[in-house]
Amino acid sequence: MEERIDSSVAASAELPASPSLSRPTTDLDKEQTKKAGNRKALVIGVIMAVVVVVLLIGAIAFLTTDYARTANIRDIVIILFAFGSLIMSIAIGILLVLLVYRLQELIGFLRGELVPAIHTMQKTVNTVRGTTTFVSDNVAKPTIKVASFMAGVQQMARTANAKVRNRNGHNGAGTA
């Protein structure tokens, strides 16, 4: 039986360690990875900017050489912008109609659901206020009056007891 235990321990010791368990990622590794990603994004951004500038320079050079073609391209661009503006105006109009519809639904919800709930809460608050006033007037005030009366009686009894003891010659330090 001891051999089985020893062999199972040896077998588990021979298993290769998982890469994720062998070396935990540190904050330094994460920071280096982040910096490398930022450098990559910066290089890609610079390359794209250079490509865009080269294309713009090429387009300007092409358009300045042939005025008839430039006029045709200008007319096409104007038509495309007008068409895009028309589509955007229609889309904005549809969105405004949807917004008004949703606003009407919200107003209906507020009138139908929220206002009755607020009225119910106001009734509950008024009920609680009435209950509190009732308990205060009929339970708390009489109880306070009785307790204060009893405290006064106790104090009066202590004072009378102390005077009786002083008259009889007791000093009040103990019973004789």
Image (cartoon, grey):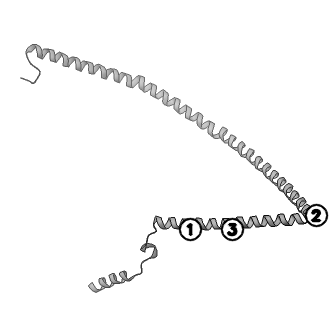
Task: Report the Cα–Cα distance between label 3 and label 2.
Answer: 33 Å
Give 107 or 81, whichever is nearer the viewer.
81
Q: Quadrant of the C terminus?
A: top left
Residue 47 marker: 3
Say which element carries label 2.
Answer: helix
Give 50 or 91, whichever is nearer the viewer.
50
Q: Quadrant of the N terminus?
A: bottom left
Residue 118 image position (x, y, % from top left)? 59, 35
Dot 2: within a 10 Å radius of its alpha carbon, few (fewer than 14), some, or many (20 or more) residues?
few
Residue 119 image position (x, y, % from top left)? 59, 33
The reply to whether the C-beta atoms of the residues labelled 3 and 2 are less than 8 Å apart is no
Residue 53 image position (x, y, % from top left)? 75, 64
**Residue with the mark numbered 1:** 36
Say which element carries label 1.
Answer: helix
Q: In this view, does 163 lie above or below 67?
A: above
> Sequence order check: which comes first, mark 3 or mark 1?
1
Seen in the image, is 69 located left or right of residue 139?
A: right
**Residue with the mark numbered 2:** 68
